[in-house]
Image: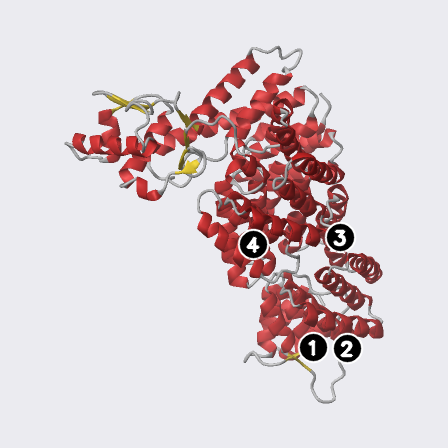
Amino acid sequence: MTAHELERAVADGDPAAVLAAVADRTDTDLLPGELGLVERAARVVAPDGGPLPVALAWRLGYARHQAGHFADALVAYERAFVAEGEQVDPGDHAHLLASRASSLWATGDAETSRQAADEALEAARASGDDLALAAAWVSQALVCVLEGDLDANLVAYEKGLAAAFRGGDVLMQARIHNNLGSRCNSEGRYTEAVAHLDQAIALAESVSAPPPVRALALITRSDSLLGLGRVDECLAELHLARALTRTSESPLLGLAIVGIGDANRVCGNATQAGLAYREALVIAERTGNAQIAVPALSGLARALVVDDVDEAQGLVKRALDQPAAVGQVDPMLAAGWVCLATGDRESAGEFSRLAVREAGRRHDSRGLAEALELQSLLLSGARAVDLLDEAGTLWRSTSNAIGLATNQVLRARVVGDSVAEQAARRRLRALGVRDDATRIAGPLQALGQADRARVSIRTLGAFAVLCDGEPVPASAWQSRKSRDALKILAGRRGRPITREALTEHLWPDSPGSGNRLSVVLSTLRSVLDPDKAQASDHYLCADREAVRLDTEHVEVDAAVFTQTATSALKALRTTSRVAGPESDVVEELERAAAMYTGHFLEDDPYSDFTVDVRDELLSLALEVKRELALALLERGENHRAIPWLVGLIVDDPYDEPSHHHLIATLHQARRHGEARRAYRGYAARMKEIGTPALPLEELLAPG
């Protein structure tokens, strides 16, 4: 059956021709992604939504499953019927059972999916149809994951891959390589996973597979890259997957957005992580997809623990109550970290023990390492160090650079080695982990930051004010104008603003507002120093002409970033380019890049006072990243430069020099497939703005 033949039959509105096109199995199964076509075919054959012949019913269900509509897929399988005296193709019957088993697996129904998978395998063996046999072995492999039998899972995939190869089903081969890559990810074998996923992507591209197939491989590959500490590359894959699925209403869009949330959570962007998880939850609730709901609920709980403890605790409970085909390690860890953050050490210990057992049963090295670290923070002395060393061995064995550097921070703190802790924190910054990771429930949040100012204001991302490390409650503000005034002053980063200008921002075109401004400033002093422990001008300086924050006593993240970035760029420009940038200059650039945790006041994007500051800070952040990438390239550290180049392109898709550097650097690193994919992305962006792309051969030419 080909899509072209079926399209013609559907256009003619001829049920017999539709069924003939479906029954003509002269090539591989209808491409997943042709869901709209198969839906129209079903309406031609059964306009009232009634029973369908087996050959059409399973294809309708399979197309819905591949689009992520699992509940709708199960409805399609139930519509299958056999007319009296009709002979059903044994392969179609086996496909129906195998596809149904896979959809049942996706809903977390272990018992029923096992029964369906066993029936599918028996029917496929009897049919002698390699295509049906491949599908049946895949359903077996999926059910084995649900049951925790990973040895049987691998055997099933190997048999399914052999059958797909014999039957010439390229898309099924791509699907199995994707699933094998996912399995490697769950066990922390990220390099091996990338090899499977590169193969899956190549197979999908060889037959011009529809967007959902390519998107799934990109999503799985992004998880591998995140495990290897290549955060910006991970995000680039996820944004491409998101673009591929944006218009399809596929729940794969939800998986891509969950991945974006995970990447931002790992590198400390609490605001961006929270926004992504909330978006994914909307998709999960619409589709009833536990594979999206569980990680989204777990991740959102961790991202909210500082800003809304009650919601974080509620989200954890919802995550633990969800059926999950991928197990409960994520929600158990989220529950443990949230309990630790809220002072419930006993419950944190219980969840850590449950996570250790579940991660061990599933060969989940990443989850096991994190669970051991959670346990270590509930202990002291030699036992804590032993657990951290065991976790460190797991991170090292999986080549998880971020996990290993975090582990080194934890160990250094436990043994009291401040020099080692600072070195490990610098490694985290180099990997793209922001200093703001302390807002997210996890190891770095549990440790906290030493020597922080009593009052700190966060403006990079969502606005927040902390006094002694605790968020200022909403009730303390009394009015929105007080918050707006502090946002304006924070954007000035210690520079004064005239009373007249501040009043105009707060009450535009409203003369005689001087008294109201005095009330607002009095409220701000009460917010910043509720106990009146300091002089009135300790945090907020105001005279008859102007107002400013005293950044000697108030830490404003935008001001610290600006100072660090400016200093690092100045040091770079005074360093000899011939000899190459000094290591401490590169470290300062990395430190500055890590401080840019989000765009200025992302939760208040339309206020007139935010636009210029946001543009200024973004421009400075891009300059830091660009100079950092070039400095690393000059030092011959291509692998360290690649993530920053990818990040620059994510921030500015039309940055042509960064595209050029990325393509050439990937080629020099012998990552030729990625270089060609990067070139296709570059060419597409240049086409959008009417600029000719340089030929690939020119970009790869020596010198």
- Whether residue 362 is situated above or below residue 438 in the rendered picture: below
* Image coordinates for residue 302, horizontal then vertical, percent: 53, 46
For residue 54, which numbered disc appears in the image?
1
- Whether residue 593 is situated above or below residue 293 in the rendered picture: above
Q: CA distance from mark 2 to mark 3?
A: 30 Å
- Sequence order check, earlier mark of 3 and 1: 1
- Disc 4 residue type (three-letter): Gly
Q: Nearer the viewer, mark 2 or mark 3?
A: 3
Q: CA distance from mark 2 to mark 4?
A: 36 Å
Q: Which residue is mark 2?
A: 89
Q: CA distance from mark 3 to mark 1?
A: 30 Å
* Image coordinates for residue 439, horizontal then vertical, percent: 50, 39
Q: CA distance from mark 1 to mark 2?
A: 9 Å
Q: Residue 102 sits in which quadrant? A: bottom right
Q: Which residue is mark 3?
A: 180
Tag count: 4
Residue at the (76%, 33%) spot, across then down? 670
Residue at the (64%, 44%) spot, across then down? 375
Q: Nearer the viewer, mark 3 or mark 1?
A: 3
Is 184 left or right of 322, judged from the image as shown? right
Q: Nearer the viewer, residue 656 or 536?
A: 536
Secondary structure under the numbered disc 2 in the rendered image: loop
Secondary structure under the numbered disc 1 in the rendered image: helix
- Sequence order check, earlier mark of 3 and 4: 3
- Sequence order check, earlier mark of 4 and 1: 1
- Disc 2 residue type (three-letter): Asp
* Image coordinates for residue 249, horizontal then vertical, percent: 54, 58
Q: Which residue is mark 4?
A: 254
Secondary structure under the numbered disc 3 in the rendered image: helix
Q: Are marks 1 and 2 in contact (CB under 8 Å)?
A: yes
